[in-house]
Each structure stands twice: as C-alpha cells, then as structure tokens.
Image (spheres, coloured by chain):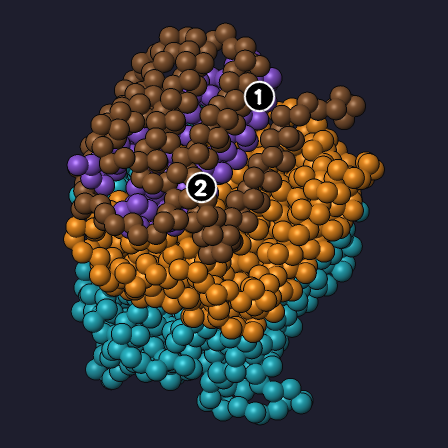
Chain colours: A purple, B orange, C brown, D cyan
C-alpha cells in the first residue's frame, strides 16, 4: 500500500538532489536543471496533498509552478547566452569579477 | 469552494496596481510600434502612471475601508507599502533618464519592467494567499533579474544577473517546497484560512508546519538580504546599473519586509517556536556583518549594498520586538514601516548622487571618485553629507528618528541587549559613512568644470533631501501614518 | 492504478533521472536524464489522479523546456562542459548539507493514509482544474500570465544581439 | 507667561536666542553655496555681518531675558513650537526652558561665543573658506543653544549630536591635511561612543516611567516631568546616571574617553577656544547639573563622577607638565579643569561646578585666543621652545594672557581662585578628603605648567628663528578686543561668587538656589569660615609658590631645567609621552592583533597612528572582523549557494528539532 509519505519522501529526495546539483555542479545549464528539479519536487508535494485532501487546489498551484518554472528557464537561458558571448564559458564560478 | 467576488470592488480597490499594469503593458506595445529614438515619451507616460497610481493608493489609504477578496487583501498596510513602492519608483524613474542614456540601455522595456516589477511588489503587499505572495515575488524578481543584466556589454552586469538568478532560483525552490508543505499541513494556501486552522494544528502535523514556515522564511530572508542569505546582494548591487540598484536596495527590500509581515502575522501564533531569539539572532548577525564588511569597501555601490544589509538588520530589531509575546505589537510594526520609508528616502538620495557623479564612460563608482567634491560641487557634497549623516542616524534627520523609534520599541519590550548591539553597530557605521564625507571634503580630487546637472536628477536629489530633513524635524505626521497603517491589518 | 509496482517504477525513474542530472558529466546526457525524471514525475501525477497536470507536465517540460535547454546546449557548442566532475571542498560541504536536509525531511515527513474516496468525477480532469483555475484562482492565473509576459520580454532583450549602431 | 516686551512675548524672545544663530548659519550657508556654485567667494562683509551679528544679537536678547528673570524670579517654559515626536504616550515637544541655570549657561555661550566670532574675523581673515567657517561656527552655536535651552532630554540630545557634528566639521576644517581630517573623525567616533550611553539612558528613563504608568502627555522626558517623578526613578537612578556619565565622559573628555581632545587641537584656534574650551566640552557638566535631582538619588554614581573627575584632573595636569605644543598644553589643562568641574558636581556642589564652568570659560577662552594670537603672530609656530620674549612684541596678548594665567592658577582675586577654591572647599567639607588632596595637588601642578608655558612664551630671551623674528607684530584690533574683554573677565568674573568668608555675598550660588536647591552649597555657617579661610589661604600660598618657582626657573634658569630634565629624564619622558597610555594600549591590545593579522592574514599597512584602546584598538578589531567576513564573499556563486543552503538547513533544524 502506497501512503502519502511515500510520495513525500520521493519529493524530499528529488528536492535534495536538486539542491545538491546546485551546490555541486559548475555548469550553469546543469545548475538550472537542478533548480527545475527543486521546483518539481514542490509540485509533487502539491499534487500528493491535493489527492490526500481530495481537493484540486494543489493541482492548480502545481500548474502555476510549472508556468513559473518555464518563465524562469527562459530568462535564465537568456542570461547564459549573454554570458557565453561575453566570456566564452558557462562555468558559474568563472563569473567572479565582484567579491569582497 | 468558489468565492463570489465583487469584481467592481476589486477594480476600484486594485486601481493602484492596475494602473501600473496597464501602463507597463502599454509601454511594451509602444516600444514595438514607436520607431523614434527619443524615449522621453516613455518616461512621461511612466511618470503619469505613477502619479495616477499614487493618487489612487493615497485615496484608498485615506478612505480606510478594509476589504478582502481572500486572495487579495486591501488594508492600510498594503496601501502604505504601495505608496512606498511608488515613491521608490518615482525617484528611480527620475534618476534613470540620464543614466540609461549614458549606458545605452535606454529602451521602452526598461521602463515597462520597472513598472511591472512594481506591480509584483504590490501583489506581495496585497497578498492574502501564499501563492499570490509567491507569484508576486517572482514577478518582482524576474523583473529584477532582467534589469540587473540589462547592461549586456558589461561583464559585471551579466555576472550580477547570473548570480542573482541562480541564488534567487534556489530561494524560489525552497519557498515553493515550503508553500507546498504549508498546503499539506493546512489544506490551503490562503493566509486567512490558515489563521483559523492554526489553532487546531495538532502535533502530528506540526512538523509539517514548522518545516513549511522555516522554508518560507528562508525565501523571505533571502529577499531582504538577511545574513546568511545576503551574499547575492553586494555583487548584484555592484553589477547592476546604478538606477536599478537604487530600486532594488529600496523597493525590493521594502517588499521583502511587507511579505515578511504578511507571513509573520499568521505564523506568529505558532507559540512553540521561540521567535524572539530567532529574530534577534538574525538581526544581530545581519547588522553586524553588514556594518563590518561595509567598513572595507572602496566601491560606493558595494558600500551602500552592505549598508542596506545592515539596515535590514536594524529593521529586524523591530521585528524581534514585534514578535515578543507572540503577538505583533503595533508600535514596533509602525516603527518598521517608518524605518522602511526613512531608509528608502535616504538611500534613494544617496544613489541619486552616485548617479549624478557619473559621466559618459566614467561611472564614478569608487568612493575615491568623490574626492574634492566639496570644492568642485559644494551643493552636491552638502546633500551627500546629509544623506550619510542620516544613514548614520544622527539628528535632525529622518534616519535618527527611524532608528530611535525602532530601538525605543525594542526597549519597550525589554530587548536591551539587542538595542545595545544595535546602537554599537550604528557607532561602527559612523566610520564608513563619514569616510565618504571625509573623502569629499578632506581629500584633493581632480579639478574640472562640473557639467550642469540634469533637471530630473536635481529634482530627485532635492525631493529626497527635503524628505530627509523635513521628516527629521517634523516626523510626527509621517509616523502617525505608519502607525495607523498597522492598526487594522486583515489577517 | 493503485498498484504499488507503478509507484516504485515511476519513483525510481524520477530519482534515477535526478541523479543522472546531477552526476552525468555531459550536459546533453543531463538534459536527457531530466526529461526522464520529469516524465517519471508525470507518471506519479497520473497515479495521484492528476491526469490533466500529467499531460501538461509532459507537454511543457518534454515539449518546451527541454527543447529550449537542448537548443541552448547545441547553440553554445560547449567545449568545457565536458570537463570531468571536480570534487572541491565546497562541493563536499554541499553534499553534506544536502544529505542532512534530506535526512531531516525524510525523518519528519510522515502523514497518515490516503483518504480513499474521491467522490468528484471531475477530479484531476481539464474540467475540474480549469473550473477552479478560472474562478477561484483567476488572480494568480493572471499574475502568472504577467510573469510569462515579463519573462518573454526579458529573454528577448537579454538575448537579442545589440544593434551595432547603438554601441558607438 | 504672556508678558509683552515691546509687543514681543518672552517666549518669542527665548526662541530668538537659538533662532538668530540658526538664521546666521542658514544665510551664510546659502551665500557660501551660491558663491561656490559660480566659482566665487561670498562677499566677506556680508558674511562677517551675519556671522558675528547674529550671535551678538542673540547675546543681547539673552542679557535682556536675564534681567527679566532676575526681576521676576520666574523661569520661562515655552509652549512647543511643534511636537517633534509623538508615538502613543511618547511625546517630545520642541520647546525651550529658560531658568536660572540655563540662562547662566546661555549667557556664557552667547557672550564668549560672540567674542570668539569677533576674534575669528581677524584670525581667519586670509582663509579661503572664510564663509564656510562662519556657517559652521553659527551652526555650532545654534546646536549648543538647543543643548542648553531644550526643555527635555531628547532635545538636549539633538544639541548634543549637533555640537559633535559641528565640532567634527570644524576640527577637520583645513582639509588638505589628512592628519587633521583624521583627528576630526576620531573626535566624532569617540563622541559617538559617549552618545550611545546617553541614548541608552534616555530609553531606560522612558521605559521606567512608562512601566510605572506615569501620565506623560505633557511631554515625556521633560526635565520638569523627570524631576516631578524622581521617586519612581530611584531604582534605575544609578544605571541611568552612569550611562549619562558615559555620555558626559565622551563629550567632556574625561578618562577614558579623553584621548580625542588633544588631537582635536588640529582645528583653527578660535574653534579650540569656543568648542574645546569654553562651551561644548562643558556640556557634560551642564547635563549633570541639569539632572541634579536624578544624580542626588544615586550616591554611588555621584562618587564615580567625583572620582573620575579628580583622577582626570590630576592625570591630565601631569601630562601637561611635559608637553611642548602650546595648544596641547592648553588642551590637557582643559581636560584637567573639566575634571575639577566633575569633582565639584560629583561631590554634590553643583553650583560650584557651574561656577567653575563659567570662570573657566572666561580664562580658558582668553588663554586659547591668546595662544591663537601668538601662533598667528609667529606664523603657525606652536612649539613653546621656539618662542620666548614675546612680551615686548605683543604687549596686549601678553597682558591678557597674564591675567588668564593668574586666573587659572588661582591667584586672589582672579576668577579661577574663587571657583576652584569653592570646589576644593566643598569636597573637603563633604568628607572626600582623598579627593580633596588630589585636587589640591593638582592645583599646584596646574600652577607649575601654566607658569612654565607663560614663562617660555612671553618671558626670558627669544628663541625664535632669527629670520622669522622680524615680521612679528601684535594682532589686529578684532583679535585683541575680545582678548581684552576676556582678560578683564578673568580678573573680575569670579567676583559674582565671592564667598561670605571674604566678605562677599555669593550671588552666584544664591542665583542658582531655585534650580539646584540643596545641591548648591553646604550652609555656610560661621564656624565653617575658619576652615574655609585656612584652606583658601593654604591653597593660595601653595599655588603662588609653585607658580613663582616655575616662572623663575623657566624664564631665568633654563640651563638648570635642562640639567634637571636630563637627570630625571625617565620621569620627564613618561610625562612627555603621556604615560605611554597610547603605547600601553598599543602593546596590550594592538600589537597582538597586529601580529596575528600579519602572521595569519594580512599586513596592516602603514596607517599606524596608534593612539587608543577605545578608538583604534577596537577599530582594528572591527576592521579585522570585517576583513574576515569579507573573505567569505568569495565572488563564487557556488559558495554563496552553499551559505544559503547551510542557512536554510540551520533554520529548518531550528524549527523542526
């Protein structure tokens, strides 16, 4: 029997993998993908609870998050493209002109 | 589950942001259709929209008829923050024109994005639902990412956008996760419903709630740049175009605080959580780190960035005071609202001067560029001196009054240690603020003829200067306004 | 559909895909793993009776977001992306932090059983979701549309090459 | 009070006192800014007229009010001009309070202030920034008057901050010189430490009153309210008084916050005379006298004040013995005399403290202005070993300086004698024998170093560079006139408070009786007169002889001195180097940190003007922390993300665990 908490555990793992990706990878594209994973973990929680309560609010909210994620990605990729033009690399740690 | 919405009412109540929204979209259209090089029309239209919106928000504030549509709330707190955002937007628009011309970023989208980002902030101020709050944050933040990176030719600007985007993305991820758990714990994201269910939160669900609150707080602390979630802000402030920095340092910070208010109003009833130690620690860390690192800065924008971190720390003193006894005290909240206004006025003035210092090809962002300003341009130097004094918190400026109210409200609830640390911090801050004054007056700088300042810049400096001094001497009405605003908050 | 086997299948796909995203060195492989992971997520959505959302998930992610990612990867023609994974001290700390967070989350997330009876026939369908989205959640819906507008405009002004005349 | 004088109400007159200097500052400021804008200098006559005229008018008004109060015996508590702050029950009206105490202080401030303004006309005549100078000076006067006349603590605080700010601007006035700018900043930061005590004390008093449910709608923290509710304040009196005293220490340069004052001498000499001798630095004494009812509640705080005062007096005087810079000597002497004043108020003789404040304002302003005249005449020479024999070349300066020295030394019947002896006598009578002994010894040391200064400057043979010798001349009338007036006041200024034992009537103390009440004098009954006379005579003989010896030694027998100094060079060195306080701070605190930072982190560079635990020591520590923290800002997004995640983890753990 699959319980609510199974879904929540999957979501938590997904979320932490996403966070790990951000902390671990230097390729900006993969960092963005990891952020997508984090957002999707949130979605899974929404949908799981929506089923749990028998109310569809959660699904609507998840819908919004999907749209938001798409919006973020489009801006993020534009930033990456500019960065690549400027520096010829998309290693996020190469961008460290400003510090201190 | 459907709500009968009085759409007419919503239309009337929502005029402040609807005006901006309409004008923002209109500007996007005009940008496509308008082939002329001169974008002055955009500025004029934006200013008109700001004026109209300001009028509507002011009118609603005066009428004071709290109304809630469940997802959006319309009370004095939200309108006063609308007014703060609009003031920040106004000054930003005024100082923008010359700067963006110099930087070759003068385009209609610039104005449109500023307006639309402000709409996002207003959504945060009016949020009656966590989802609306979050989407407001995202509208604001995505606008800010783009504005920060709009100087495409400059690596720094792009770097700022990238850093802001990645860190903001993480914060958004954390917050979504938090909101999802909130939904799970209470069955809704609507703040007003949460308020009722909270009393019945039993222990099995409480973990979910705590997790949710923690993650949401992380997201909000990121927005106000509280330590240790502040790392983005110096780099982003330095890299972004100065006008955008001014906007971010004031409006976004205020928006972060109003969001924090909205959430705290609800979650403060979670009595299991020791709120005061938490907020005190955040506050101490934030102001201390901000001030100490600001001491070492040579770039004025970076210095102001750290100073803005420190000021968020001072405001958190008020929040800690407000959270005492698990109910938000009016005086402390009023003090924070007032502080946001004070800080916005002063900081915008300081940034206006930074913009005024720049020339084509030389943005004068180093503090050493201010050397000899006292002789080259005494008026500008005098104004900057006033702003620095105000940021330090010395009477008779609004900065002193703001700090005084904050600390007084903390003293009133007995947070003596916090106040001592706060006052000590403001002693430390005197060092770097006066460093700027010293540089202006006591160091020889290049002597060249000063080009006349643009009228819009002069106007904005004059306005902020007037505000800093006038409200420093006669703060009563403004404070009463702040106090009134937190009196009838819709939960 | 309540068969546990499906849950475990999809869950494995989701987590496996996510691990792939994080640890595969080639960004193209990462992108493909991401598709897998998100498709698995769509499967989980189906199990949770969110059929419409599952369809949207596949459409948006596999159809739009992924294409965008892969397009950018191709366009940039990245040489240095294939650098082997460097394990720096910082990323080790990152690993520890993420691990800790996962432990905290998994330990504490426990909720009772599913409420079995979902009586509403429209649950999870376009009709049900759409009804809710365009009445009760109309305002967030509009904000999202604003968000998308801003994002599109922003992406265009950022990524568009400057008119060379303006640079002088 | 609706008495009308020439159709003007007394309240309006009271407002005119600070209003006029403010007007002067505003007009001068506008003139300066407008002139600079077009690259010119504002017309000097206009600046002079406004800059000197407004303080003088203000002085006239004050004098007028003084006579009114004298005849009516009423104090004037003006209606609020506006309400400055109002939150719930925290109300701060912006109104003035003119009573016997504040009118005395106002007379000193405007009177001496006007004279120094006049003096500045000559002294600053050739300065490029003449207009800016007068703007600041007027602004200073305005702030000082707000400090003195404000009817509540927050208003006093505004003035308190205002004078600090103006002092900062004026010390760093000659901004080409980084050392001077640094001195200004140092003074400002030390003062901020003091202000911090003041602010906390205000909060404390307010909270206490609120908790007791006192109705404060008339104005919280009004002096009148505080005095009326003093019984409620008794539990926190000691803490509040000590916190306020921290503020007073900062402003009035007492141990351990005295270090800024000698450095503050970098400013123009009239500024030193006005701010760092006559007015601003005495604000601490005034504040304690103003709050005498509060201090009387706490004997512990009083004895701290008295002890710190006495020790500072002694300590600073001994340092003064071995200084060679004419302004530095005067600076240490100011610190020392301020110590006397604190001793006076600390033992409960508030009026004696204020009396000394008044006479000190006369003679110390005279000394500074005289020194300024000498420096001006010698073209910025400040080393007393490069002076000598100036009595012929600058007769007026010489004479007035002589009067002032006689006053500070305490020769009968000069001003300083009466005030200083009053303090010493009161200390003795109230049973503080040790403090009295310290004060008594200090009087001798004071006599010695002042006479040394005097002899080296004006008597003996000239040691001036021969090629500088020729153009030495007496200063213009605008400078000598204030000198003559102040010199005269140094002679007769003390006669307002001649005690009964010298057949006087002690007007001054009777005048202050309504305000200070019991805190004026121990009732002078006849059998005390014997003691008082003995003490006075002993003190007179002591300072007279010491002073005489110093005069003879330093004018005639310089070779003896040199030999003595050589033999006793370690003592001399200790004194000259100010007890190595700076170096001790340096050794104990700065060096280890310095070493640490050099070894482990960075080298500190060459910004090594190390002089003080309170300023530079902590500044360095703070700087170090700043460096460490800014190292965390690596510029790597991944590190930022790491901190963010760690913070998130911390917060989650805090909530969940």
Image-quadrant location for residue C7: top left
Judged by depth in the image, the label closer to the viewer, 1 or 2, is 2
Instruction: Tell me residue B323's x, y (percent).
Output: 30, 59
What's the distance in space between the residues labelled 1 and 2, CA to CA?
27 Å
| Secondary structure of the residue carrying numbered label 2 | helix
Residue at left 59%, top 18%?
Answer: A86
Residue at left 37%, top 58%?
Answer: B191
- Identify the residue position indicated by label 1 in the image: A81
- Relative to B387, residue B232 above or below: above
- Relative to B280, residue D142 above or below: below
Q: Quadrant of the N terminus of chain A?
A: top left
- Please tell me how crowded label 1 is: few (under 14), some (14-19), or many (20+) other residues with Cα within 10 Å: many
Instruction: Tell me residue B293's x, y (percent).
Output: 41, 35
Instruction: Tell me residue D617's x, y (percent).
Output: 33, 37
Q: Which mark is residue A63?
A: 2
Residue at left 51%, top 10%?
Answer: C78
| Secondary structure of the residue carrying numbered label 1 | helix
Name the residue nearer the viewer: B311 or D275: B311
Q: Which mark is residue B45?
A: none
- Relative to B319, residue C143 above or below: above
Image-quadrant location for residue D119: bottom right
């Amino acid at each position: 029997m699959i319980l609510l908490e199974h879904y929540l555990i999957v979501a938590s793992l997904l979320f932490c993998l996403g966070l790990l990706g951000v902390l671990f990878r230097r390729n900006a594209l993969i960092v963005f993908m990891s952020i997508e994973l984090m957002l999707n973990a949130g979605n899974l929680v929404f949908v799981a609870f929506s089923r749990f309560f028998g109310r569809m609010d959660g699904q609507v909210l998840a819908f919004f998050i999907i749209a938001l994620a798409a919006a973020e990605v489009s801006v993020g990729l534009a930033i990456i493209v500019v960065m690549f033009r400027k520096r010829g690399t998309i290693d996020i740690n190469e961008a460290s002109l400003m510090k201190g | 589950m459907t709500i009968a919405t009085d759409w007419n009412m919503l239309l009337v109540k929502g005029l402040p942001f609807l005006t901006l929204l309409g004008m923002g979209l209109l500007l996007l259209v005009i940008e496509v259709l308008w082939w002329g090089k001169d974008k002055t029309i955009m500025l004029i239209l934006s200013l008109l929209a700001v004026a109209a919106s300001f009028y509507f928000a002011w009118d609603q504030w005066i009428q004071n008829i709290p109304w809630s549509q469940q997802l959006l709330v319309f009370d004095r707190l939200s309108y006063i923050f609308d007014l703060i955002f609009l003031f920040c937007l106004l000054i930003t628009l005024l100082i923008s024109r010359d700067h963006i011309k110099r930087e070759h970023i003068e385009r209609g989208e610039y104005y449109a994005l500023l307006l639309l980002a402000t709409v996002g902030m207003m959504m945060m101020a009016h949020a009656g639902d966590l989802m609306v709050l979050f989407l407001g944050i995202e509208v604001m933040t995505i606008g800010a990412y783009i504005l920060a990176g709009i100087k495409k030719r400059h690596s720094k600007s792009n770097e700022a956008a990238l850093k802001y985007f990645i860190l903001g993305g993480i914060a958004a991820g954390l917050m979504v996760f938090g909101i999802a758990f909130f939904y799970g714990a209470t069955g809704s994201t609507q703040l007003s419903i949460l308020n009722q269910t909270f009393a019945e939160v039993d222990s099995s669900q409480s973990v979910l709630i705590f997790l949710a609150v923690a993650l949401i707080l992380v997201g909000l602390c990121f927005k106000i740049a509280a330590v240790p979630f502040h790392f983005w802000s110096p780099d982003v402030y330095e890299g972004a175009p100065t006008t955008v920095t001014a906007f971010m340092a004031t409006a976004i910070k205020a928006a972060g605080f109003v969001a924090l208010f909205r959430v705290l109003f609800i979650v403060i009833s979670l009595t299991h959580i020791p709120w005061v130690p938490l907020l005190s620690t955040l506050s101490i860390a934030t102001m201390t780190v901000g001030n100490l690192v600001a001491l070492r800065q040579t770039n004025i924008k970076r210095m102001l960035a750290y100073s803005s971190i420190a000021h968020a720390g001072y405001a958190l003193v008020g929040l800690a005071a407000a959270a005492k006894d698990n109910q938000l005290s009016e005086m402390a909240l009023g003090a924070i609202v007032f502080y946001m206004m004070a800080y916005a006025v002063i900081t915008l003035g300081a940034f206006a001067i930074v913009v005024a210092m720049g020339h084509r090809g030389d943005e004068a962002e180093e503090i050493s560029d201010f050397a000899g300003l006292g002789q080259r341009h005494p008026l500008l130097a005098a104004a900057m001196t006033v702003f620095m004094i105000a940021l330090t918190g010395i009477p008779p400026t609004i900065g002193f009054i703001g700090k005084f109210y904050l600390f007084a409200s903390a003293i009133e609830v007995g947070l003596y240690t916090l106040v001592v640390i706060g006052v000590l911090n403001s002693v430390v801050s005197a060092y770097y603020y006066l460093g700027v004054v010293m540089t202006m007056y006591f160091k020889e700088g290049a002597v060249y003829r000063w080009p006349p300042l643009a009228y819009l810049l002069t106007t904005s400096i004059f306005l902020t200067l007037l505000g800093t001094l006038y409200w420093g001497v006669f703060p009563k009405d403004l404070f009463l306004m702040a106090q009134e605003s937190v009196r009838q908050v819709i939960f | 559909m309540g068969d546990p086997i499906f849950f475990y299948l999809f869950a494995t796909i989701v987590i496996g895909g996510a691990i792939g995203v994080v640890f595969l060195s080639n960004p193209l492989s990462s992108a493909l793993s991401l598709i897998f992971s998100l498709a698995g997520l769509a499967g989980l959505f189906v199990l949770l009776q969110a059929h419409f959302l599952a369809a949207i998930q596949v459409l948006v992610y596999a159809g739009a977001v992924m294409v965008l990612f892969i397009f950018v990867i191709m366009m940039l023609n990245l040489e240095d992306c294939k650098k082997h994974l460097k394990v720096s001290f910082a990323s080790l700390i990152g690993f520890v932090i993420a691990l800790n967070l996962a432990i905290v989350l998994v330990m504490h997330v426990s909720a009772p059983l599913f409420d079995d009876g979902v009586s509403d026939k429209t649950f999870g369908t376009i009709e049900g979701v759409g009804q809710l989205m365009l009445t009760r959640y109309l305002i967030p819906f509009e904000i999202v549309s604003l968000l998308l507008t801003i994002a599109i405009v922003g992406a265009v002004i950022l990524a568009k090459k400057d008119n060379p005349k303006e640079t002088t | 009070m609706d008495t009308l004088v020439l159709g003007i109400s007394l309240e309006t007159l009271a407002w005119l006192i600070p209003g006029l200097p403010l007007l002067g500052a505003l007009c001068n400021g506008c003139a300066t800014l407008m002139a600079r804008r077009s690259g010119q200098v504002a017309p000097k006559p206009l600046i002079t007229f406004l800059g000197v005229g407004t303080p003088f008018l203000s002085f006239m008004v004050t004098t007028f009010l003084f006579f009114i109060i004298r005849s009516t015996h009423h104090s004037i508590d003006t209606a609020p001009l506006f309400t400055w702050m109002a939150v719930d029950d925290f109300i701060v009206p912006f109104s003035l309070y003119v009573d016997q105490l504040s009118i005395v202080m106002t007379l000193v401030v405007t009177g001496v202030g006007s004279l120094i303004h006049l003096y500045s006309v000559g002294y600053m005549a050739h300065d490029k920034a003449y207009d800016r100078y007068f703007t600041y000076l007027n602004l200073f006067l305005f702030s000082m008057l707000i400090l003195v006349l404000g009817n509540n603590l927050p208003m006093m605080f505004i003035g308190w901050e205002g004078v600090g700010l103006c002092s900062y601007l004026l010390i760093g006035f000659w901004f080409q010189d980084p050392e001077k700018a640094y001195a200004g900043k140092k003074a400002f930061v030390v003062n901020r430490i003091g202000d911090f005590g003041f602010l906390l004390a205000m909060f404390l008093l307010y909270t206490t009153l609120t908790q007791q449910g006192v109705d404060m709608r008339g104005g919280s923290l009004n002096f009148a309210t505080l005095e009326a509710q003093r019984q409620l304040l008794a539990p926190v009196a000691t803490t509040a008084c000590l916190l306020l005293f921290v503020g007073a220490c900062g402003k009035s340069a007492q141990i351990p916050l005295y270090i800024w004052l000698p450095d503050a001498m970098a400013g123009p000499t009239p500024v030193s005379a006005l701010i760092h001798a006559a007015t601003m630095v005495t604000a601490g004494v005034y504040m304690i006298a103003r709050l005498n009812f509060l201090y009387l509640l706490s004997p512990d705080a009083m004895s701290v004040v008295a002890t710190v005062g006495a020790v500072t007096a002694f300590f600073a005087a001994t340092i003064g013995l071995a200084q060679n810079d004419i302004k530095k000597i005067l600076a240490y002497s100011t610190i020392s005399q301020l110590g006397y004043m604190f001793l006076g108020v600390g033992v409960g003789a508030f009026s004696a403290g204020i009396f000394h404040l008044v006479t000190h304002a006369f003679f110390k302003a005279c000394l500074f202005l005289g020194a300024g005249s000498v420096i001006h005449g010698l073209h910025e020479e400040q080393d007393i070993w490069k002076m000598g024999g100036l009595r012929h070349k600058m007769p007026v300066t010489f004479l007035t300086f002589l009067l002032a020295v006689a006053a500070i030394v305490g020769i009968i019947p000069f001003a300083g004698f009466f005030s200083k002896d009053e303090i010493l006598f009161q200390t003795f009578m109230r049973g503080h024998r040790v403090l009295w002994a310290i004060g008594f010894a200090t009087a001798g040391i004071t006599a010695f170093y002042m006479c040394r200064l005097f002899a080296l400057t004006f008597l003996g043979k000239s040691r001036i560079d021969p090629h500088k010798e020729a153009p030495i001349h007496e200063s213009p009338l605008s400078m000598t006139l204030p000198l003559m007036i102040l010199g005269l006041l140094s002679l007769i200024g003390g006669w307002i408070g001649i005690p009964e034992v010298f057949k006087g009537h002690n007007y001054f103390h009777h005048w202050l009786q309504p305000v200070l009440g019991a805190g004026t004098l121990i009732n002078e009954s006849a059998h005390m007169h014997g003691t008082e006379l003995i003490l006075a005579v002993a003190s007179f003989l002591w300072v007279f002889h010491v002073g005489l010896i110093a005069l003879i030694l330093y004018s005639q027998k310089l070779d003896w001195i040199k030999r003595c100094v050589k033999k006793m060079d370690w003592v001399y060195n200790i004194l000259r180097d100010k007890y190595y306080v700076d170096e001790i701070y340096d050794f104990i605190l700065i060096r280890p940190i310095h070493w640490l930072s050099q070894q482990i982190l960075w080298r500190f560079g060459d910004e090594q003007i190390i002089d003080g635990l309170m300023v530079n020591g902590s500044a360095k520590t703070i700087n170090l922390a700043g460096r460490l923290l800014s190292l965390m800002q690596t510029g790597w997004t991944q590190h930022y993300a790491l901190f963010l995640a760690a913070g998130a983890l911390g917060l989650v753990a805090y909530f969940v665990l």
